[in-house]
Amino acid sequence: MVLVNDEPVTAYEIEQRANLLAANSGGNSAALKAKAQARWREITKDPRTNQRLQRLFREKGVKTREEAMAVQRAFAKDLQRKMFEQLKRDTRAGQVAQLRKQAQKELIEERLKLQEAKRLGVAISDAEVDRIMQGVAKRNNMTAAQFSEHLKRAGIDAQSMRERFRAHYSWRQAIHRRFGAQISITRRDVDRMVADSANESGHDTIELHLQRITLPMPSHIDQTALAKRFAEAEAMRRKFTTCRAMPSLAKTISDAKFEDLKTVKPSTIHEPTRSMLLGAKDGDILPPATAPSGIEVYAICGRRVNNGDDKQREKAMAKLQAQAFERIAERHLRDLKQDAHIEYR
């Protein structure tokens, strides 16, 4: 048993959670297939299997070849079903011992999560847990009662699954209540995610309005000359106020070249400049960077989202929010563990 801030986690709960984890793990499908094939060969070679089939023929009063084949198919199907069920039980039994430690850790964390949710007044009710369980049962084409019976046959107390759901959804609400105001996803965060996804698929979903000043480099240059060019570019950059000032800034250096690139697809810009542009705000200017043509300084003057990308942006926003909440949740759980009194008995 474990006490978590004087609240017990019992040996029975640990055993049941280990059973649930084993059932959800699925095991090694290749290994299970190999075991099934070996077991099936044993079953088919066992004389008792044929004796059982012959007895079934007599019980069914089989008279024709077609009847015999139908009974044999049903017999084989039932044998295979029972064989797989037994193999899964054996596999889970072997996994449970290994999963007890994981189960104990999970239950300790769930106690902490539920305690925090209760403190914040957001722990979900039994009725809400019932609705979640009914939804799971429905997705498995069962009623809630049938699903509970299905779990029972697998050696799992439905209460273990109920409490797992209770902790998960209570914790999610607790994190949203306590830290929701701290989550801030900016337009450029969304732009970057959408653009990264688009770059992987080969389709840009936004276009950037860029201006660029290039300080050319001779074909042969030493470190001193390179440092001087960077210093000139940085001094020019510090004078930047708006995109309208870019042409005038270029004129402060005799051989600098100004270009208004208009709208540019991010995928056409080399890295790491592309990521820096996507991460910058409109009206920003990037630090100087080397390029084949010389030292480049980019200004971001605006951006345009291509039509039909609202769903992609919504999906990106939801993903970024989920990632932010997950990071906060992990950090907060770590803090709760550090402050908790956990006693192993």
Image (cartoon, rainbow, N blue to C red):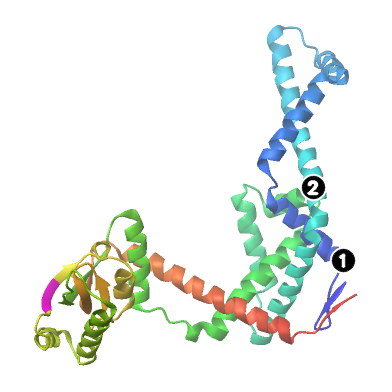
Front-most of 50 and 217?
Answer: 217
Q: Which of the 4 image quadrants contains residue 228? A: bottom left
Q: Residue, x 76% and y 27% (percent of image)?
A: 40
Farthest-out residue, top:
64
Are the residues flagged by discs 1 and 2 in contact, CB closer than 8 Å?
no
Quadrant of the frame with the C terminus: bottom right
Q: Is residue 179 left or right of residue 276?
A: right
Secondary structure type for disc 1: helix
Q: Is residue 245 visible?
A: yes
- Range covered by the magenta-colored residues: 257-261
Q: Residues within 10 Å of mark 2 (few under 14, many from 20)?
A: few
- Residue name at image x 75 percent, y 58 percent: 158
> Where is residue 190 shown, x and y percent of the image?
36, 72
Q: Which residue is mark 1?
A: 11
Quick one: label 1, few (<14), some, or many (20+) residues within 10 Å? few
Q: Amino acid at mark 1?
A: Ala
Does 82 lie within the magenta span? Answer: no
341 left or right of 125? right
Image point (76%, 7%), residue name? 63
Identity, as a three-letter code, of the amino acid under mark 2: Arg
Camera-near label (1 vs 2) is: 1
Dividing the picture into quadrants, the one containing residue 282 is bottom left
Q: Nearer the viewer, residue 344 or 258?
A: 258
